[in-house]
Image (cartoon, rainbow, N blue to C red):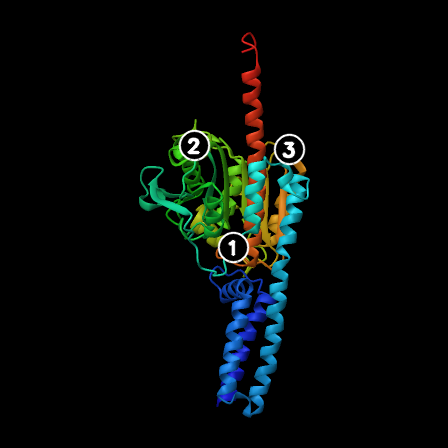
Amino acid sequence: MVPWLFLAVSVWGAAFTANALRPSRRWQFIGPSFFAEWLTAELAWWHLAWQAVATAVFAVLGAFSAWPGWLGLAITVASWVGLVAITREARTSADSVKAALVEVIGDEDPIRSLTPDAAAALRERRRERHPRLPFKLTDRRVERIGNLRYAPGAGRRHLLDVYRPRAGCRDAPVLLQIHGGGWVIGTKRQQALPLMMHMSAAGWVCVAANYRLSPKATWPDHLVDVKAALAWVREHIAEYGGDPDFVVVTGGSAGGHLAALVGLTANRPEYQPGFESADTSVAAAVPIYGVYDLLDLFEHHGPKGRGHAWLAKMIMKATAEEEPERYRSASPIEQVHPDVPPFLVVHGSADNLVPVDQARRFVRDMRAVSRAPVGYAEIRGASHAFEVFHSVRTGNVVAGIDEFLTWLHGRHVAVRETSVSRAVGASPGDR
């Protein structure tokens, strides 16, 4: 009995490994393939550990007294080889991020463009070790000020949280985080916590906002709410130590879609009803595994037509045939233009929810027209939502985003100081 039970457990563990190595490409919001890939690919060493412990326990219980046990051992060893390969692939994320930074910055090391103090701080952060516990998503150096209302109505959907250094800050750069969840689920406290903890500990002020969800909300309600949160940041973030003149936006999945649109639709009055005069421009956008083409999103996943029907019923409240312009206006790839802020696009090559081709095409179109730099980090083997908790890939991507944003903020500070110096040095007749 024990050898057969060990064989069953071995097959079960190997199935997780195989799915992480070659995930299903069917569209599945809550499908087992996605969750199995996600948790195995990002926690490969933990899977190897539980399989090793299970093997040891079964060995003591006599699993190798019959041939099914030895077959189970062979399957388990093959699974371990696969898990080691997954871990080695995860480490290549550092190279992908570095290549993206070189594309944007034009230098192997952004430190060379920073002030001495900023360079020293970044060097110190590079020496920090990534958290070893995947789900330890707090940092004693960071305080959270929760549930601040940024717009009237909508209950808890118009609330945001502010994360800032516990030691205090003044005129700190600001990062606005937009959660994902297919525009129908999700909250401000579920995603990007590794990034926000890292950036807040580094001296940034981070803001995570809820927004109205479908099916109650109809596009573009989601974008309107995010812009209302951004308008609140402009008006109030100085009270929490932030600099309203330097705000960047990020988000994952549906949040990546919204982050991209925030960067592409600055100050568009149709998305700012009642606050048309508010400045909703951003200094940069960092969409992560975002959706960039709503018309193409479901073409290669699941039974043809089902995904489009879901999108029309739940989010858009109209089909693409009925209102094609609404779908185009909601697709970042259709909103590309020359006057956009710098972008850093991050996407996993093994994403089985949002095809990586969406990111590739979006970046290609952006680079063709944008006057600002557009970086692209394609993370080998990464699944959707790979950076929700701590992992090898999460640490490398968070560090890369830190360097990209630190470089941009350094440029912002240099321009501001140059402007001040010129104003101070001008003669009275020139002023």
Residue that badge 2 annotates: 234
Mark 3 or 2: the one toward you: 2
Task: Evaluate whether residue 427 shows in this view.
Answer: yes
N-terminal label among 3 and 2: 2
User: Toward which corner of the image does residue 104 lie, by quadrant?
Assistant: top right
Task: Evaluate whether residue 324 shows in this view.
Answer: no
Residue visible at 52% across and 81% down?
56
User: Toward which corner of the image does residue 208 lie, by quadrant?
Assistant: top left
N-terminal label among 3 and 1: 3
Disc 3 marks a residue whose amino acid type is: Arg
Mark 3 or 1: the one toward you: 1
Disc 1 marks a residue whose amino acid type is: Glu
x%, y% of residue 323? 50, 42
Q: Is residue 369 above or below residue 37?
A: above
Question: On residue 387, which mark appears?
Answer: 1
Q: Residues within 10 Å of mark 3 (few under 14, many from 20)?
A: some
Disc 2 element? helix
Q: Of residues 109 and 177, which is closer to you in this image?
A: 109
Question: On residue 371, which mark appears?
Answer: 3
Q: Residues within 10 Å of mark 2 (few under 14, many from 20)?
A: many
Disc 3/disc 2 C-alpha distance (Å)? 25 Å
x%, y% of residue 191? 45, 52
Disc 3 element? loop
Disc 2 marks a residue whose amino acid type is: Arg
Instruction: Specify whether 155 is left or right of 73.
Output: left
Disc 3/disc 1 C-alpha distance (Å)? 29 Å
Q: Is there a contact, CB below 8 Å, between mark 2 and mark 1?
A: no
Q: Is residue 50 above or below residue 108?
A: below
Disc 2/disc 1 C-alpha distance (Å)? 28 Å
